[in-house]
Amino acid sequence: MDKVYNQKGVEERIYRQWEERGYFSPNKDKTGKEYSIILPPTNANGALHFGHAMYVVEDILIRFHRMKGLNVLWLPGTDHAGIETQFVFEKKLKEIGKSRFDFDKDTLYEMIKQYVDQNRGGIEKQLRSLGFSLDWTKEKYTLDEDIVKIVYDTFKKLFDDGLIYRAEKLVNYCTFDGTSFSDLEVVYEERKDPLYYIKYGPLVLATTRPETKFGDTAVAVNPDDQRFRKYIGKEIEIETVLGKTNMKVIADKMVDMGFGTGVVKITPAHDFDDYEVSLRHNLPMVRVINYDGTMNEKAGKFKGMYVKQARKAIVEEMQKKELIDHIDENYVHRIGLCYKCKNPIEPLPLEQWFINMQPLKKDAVGAVKKGLIKIHPKKFEKTYYQIIDNYKDWNISRQIVWGIKIPAWKCRECQKWTVTNGEAPEKCANCASKKIFQDPDTFDTWFSSGQWPYATLKTTNSLKFYPTSVMETGYDILRAWVVRMTMLGIYIQKRLGVENKEKQIPFRNVVLHGLVNDPFGKKMSKSKGNVINPIDLVDQYGADAVRFALVYGTALGNDQSLSYPKLDAMRKFTNKLWNMARLIELKRAQAKWSSASFYGFDDLRNLKLNKSDKEWIEKVEALSENVTKLIDKYDFNHASQNLYEFTWHQFADIYLEDVKKRINEEFNASIDPASMIVLESLYLVLLKLLHPFVPFVTEEIYKRLWGKDDYLIVSKWPYDEKTKD
RNA sequence: GGAUUCGUAGCUCAGUUGGUUAGAGCGUUGCAUUGACAUUGCAAAGGUCAGAGGUUCGAAUCCUCUCGGAUCCACCA
């Protein structure tokens, strides 16, 4: 054995050997208990991030349970990541002076598909280099035909059940990206904008958006506001830049008497609050802004101008006509921006598909309340409830091409929709007209990934693993993904006729890890240029050191900053393990001992031993129990810390030093064979306990020291107890 | 505005249901060592556990407030 452990070449070789022997796949013949995790689908366009390395938590669980003898499945997959990917692709187009409008939708789709296919595999390589024992034979993709089929099925079922409806509602629309977004995809930014005080007949009101006044359908005041009582219910005549018009004054408690003048213009088509008011008061919705961000004919001579230009022009015109009372130039407010292109989100009315979330909420809350799904760490339970509580109906249509087309066809004759489970219908289901056309929109990416556990297990013929044991992911997508999976997962099972509530849920445990920041505690982001690729660290420190560093010293669910000193310490630890093996090899020779057969704790105790050996057996067994319990509790932090501390500062520093001394003293003489057996057996126990954390070096040592034909990855976990997951 | 969370040695962080001298890694200092270990071993220094008050026989740990940081949600003309 080399003096120093060098992982280069070793890791790749061992990974290949494991994979070739099929150790990553469930054992078909095994009738034992199932244990399964589905890897959160990674972005198919190849975007890397450190979250992927944190999936080491899953590998630890998988290896641990595999060694415990359970039938284990860890299933990888990729996500087409609709908006994300199309956005990246459009940026590429822009670099060559093109835009999506230069291509028809089918061509654009094909181009993106090719682009994605070229970039696939990057993340897979990364996951492999980290040693993840994923069953690659079952890898799925959200655009696989059989997955898409299930997505269609679910849509149709929801539609048939009346849980999906088509409605014109105000949506978050980005006029630059040409699509609507869910509330989650809007980011807010504080800005200083002028607040215009506009004369509205006898009233004055404050607004930041004078250009939308052509879409006003009322003026509102607070019902308790004495100042304006006499106007409520009346029509007032107002002068505008386009001439005189009448406006009704309504009373609504949403008006804050203290803000501005206490008078608000109501523009239902371009403001979310106004939209709500319009529903309460039956006000008409007048749209004055087009989907490309220009003003429409309602804006008269301002038609065709972009919103920003129009605002300026209108204000100038109003000033000329003395319709502006005054302007507050220092008004600070928050405006919604597109999370992708950072342009202002324009609230626009648009016909979209929505899922009625109300009926789905109850089951998702109940599953956690009843303890069918457990969330770790527990602190995220509150967040979970809060998220569900705030859920509004889910807009699942996106006006982009990169995604799964919505299987709905509209009739030109009767205007009704025909929904199928994928196949194009010949005629309208309502009036039998053949003049039908498919909705050009695609599904929100999360609608497909929200069905991931059932879809992947069904299509890989692995339904016996449903529900999965653990869903492990970053806490940042608890809202976007985990909650939706819970809702859709339960819905699908109920719809399949599954009545047992324990079988309806998609997973029994939710485990959430924290985020990895850069060494200065700053969030890694491409724009800041502080992104670190885990593969580079694996090259430098070895996968084992990276893995150990990520779970050591950080409580589950807490963020951590990448620490080079820690990585270094962990690399030294793998080297320490290696040298412990060298010592054993050496002492073996000195003691004229040729490899031991292994003994379990009970067998060891039956040997004739000195007091010291006996004590160490007890200590290692206690450690085994401790580590087992900690992993069961998802406390990888303490499991790894205890392993580190014991292995190095107890086992190596005290026990091995003692053994070394004893063998040296009895050099060439008769080292008690029992002592050698204890030494080798206990060291092997440590290797096994450490294997889920540092799989490569432990496997390599196992091969070197004992040269057996079997592998540590499928060896028996040293501590027995009833497995609970 | 609502909620969550954090503020522990120079740095990065642990601290499980409140219980004796508050822990680790890295760093620092001293000694030893190259006969398992790009070393490693032994030892040391270093903390008013953000601040104030309260509950308790006893609090870093529970409660209240203040200060400071982070995140999530709601987004008001």
Image (cartoon, rainbow, N blue to C red):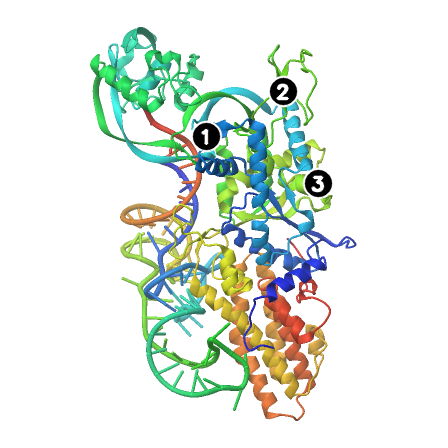
User: What residue lies at 72% left-to-right and 67% top-to-bottom?
Assistant: A710
Q: Residues within 10 Å of mark 1 (few under 14, many from 20)?
A: many
Badge 2 amino acid: Trp
Q: Could you say which disc has been placed on residue A129 in the image?
A: none
The Cα–Cα distance between marks 2 and 3, rounded to whole angstroms, is 27 Å
Badge 1 amino acid: Asp
Q: Could you say which disc has been placed on residue A459 in the image?
A: 3
Q: Sequence-wise, which precedes: disc 1 or disc 3?
A: 1
Task: Tell me the subunit letter for badge 3.
Answer: A
Residue A356: x and y in percent read 56, 26
Seen in the image, is A641 located left or right of residue A454? left
The Cα–Cα distance between marks 1 and 3, rounded to whole angstroms, is 34 Å
Q: Sequence-wise, which precedes: disc 1 or disc 2?
A: 1
Q: What secondary structure is found at the residue carrying circle 3?
A: helix
Q: Which residue is mark 1?
A: A177
Q: Sequence-wise, which precedes: disc 2 or disc 3?
A: 2
Badge 3 amino acid: Thr
Between disc 2 and disc 3, the foreground one is 2
Q: What secondary structure is found at the residue carrying circle 2?
A: strand
Residue A138: x and y in percent read 68, 47
Q: Is residue A71 visible?
A: yes
Note whether A162 is above or below B13 in the view shown: above
Q: Which residue is mark 2?
A: A409
Q: Residues within 10 Å of mark 2 (few under 14, many from 20)?
A: many
